[in-house]
Amino acid sequence: MTAAPKPPSSYEDPIVARHSLDGKRVLVVGGSSGFGRQVALDAAISGADVIVVGRDSAKAHATSQEAGALAHGKASALAIDVGDERGRTALVEAVGMVDHVVSTLGGRLADDTPEVDDEAFRQVAARKVEENRLLMEVLSHSVRDGGSFVLTAGSTRRPGEHDGVAAVAGNAEIEDLVREKAVLLAPRLRVNAVAPTWTQTPLWRHHSDADVVAMRTEMESRIPLGRTADIREVARAYLFLMTSTFITGQTIAVDGGYSLT
């Protein structure tokens, strides 16, 4: 059997470095950990002024400090819960004008969910779609002409499949939202999404090491490329969509071919 290729191990990524976000302001909602954190760091490396938004003040500020240390661009943090109207209003007032908005909102069941069932997934899906819709509505006038929104969906093999790991829900609904908003906001703004499959991130911090290893091993056996993604590989897709000015209404699966199986 041919060994699966290893993901990139070094932080400096020549693919990310070639993307130019010089002079751009990038707002990353959910930027204090996981995919959002990596996008914030890579956007800073690419020359952007980064605004990290998260509910945890310490984590948001830690990410902004790291982003600022990686590049000459400015980085700042806002501890805001955009899940309610007051938080969204505060966000609009605080950020001013930006060029790109990245959202990793939603799609997660509570840590203490006793049992994964269809109703739990429906509630998560509805919340995920609604939070992203409302975020786009309040921020659309804060994004400069030619800018973009990049949302986060998720990759599964079949519509509605839970895959045994309840991290992402409402994927099809996010894709519908992306297509809807891409038409409504064109030609001034672009709207796209990234759809990763299971990736080892801090999302799984409440699970035991053994459980995380078991999840990863199971997914590796089902992904055609024979491994799960490095978080940097997923972050690249967000930067690609921010800088690719003739792409809108699209959802890019970053899943090693998992959705094909």
Image: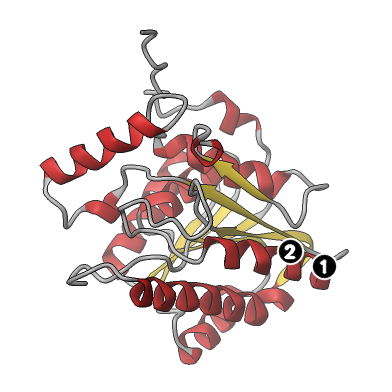
Q: CA distance from mark 2 to mark 1?
A: 7 Å
In this rendered view, identify the residue nearer to me: 190 or 139.
Answer: 190
Q: Name the residue at the bottom extreme.
A: 86
Q: Name the residue at the right extreme.
A: 187
- Which secondary structure lies at badge 1? helix
Callouts 2 and 1 close, C-beta under 8 Å: yes
The N terminus - image quarter: top left
Mark 2 — residue?
179
- 233 displayed left or right of 151: left
Give how far across and how far down residue 131 sits, in percent.
51, 78
Q: Quadrant of residue 61?
A: bottom left
Q: Is residue 121 above or below residue 83?
A: above
In this rendered view, identify the residue nearer to me: 260 or 176.
Answer: 260
Give how far across and how far down residue 122 sits, in percent.
43, 75
Disc 1 residue type (three-letter): Val
Mark 1 — residue?
183
- Which secondary structure lies at badge 2? helix
**Residue 60 in view in this figure:** yes
Disc 2 residue type (three-letter): Arg
Give how far across and how far down residue 149 sits, in percent.
66, 62
**Residue 21 in view in this figure:** no
Give how far across and how far down residue 135 sits, in percent.
58, 77
Q: Residue at x 31, y 70 (%)?
A: 117
Q: Residue at x 27, y 65 (%)?
A: 58
Q: Residues within 10 Å of mark 1 (few under 14, many from 20)?
A: some
Disc number for residue 90: none
In this rendered view, identify the residue nearer to me: 95 or 251.
Answer: 251
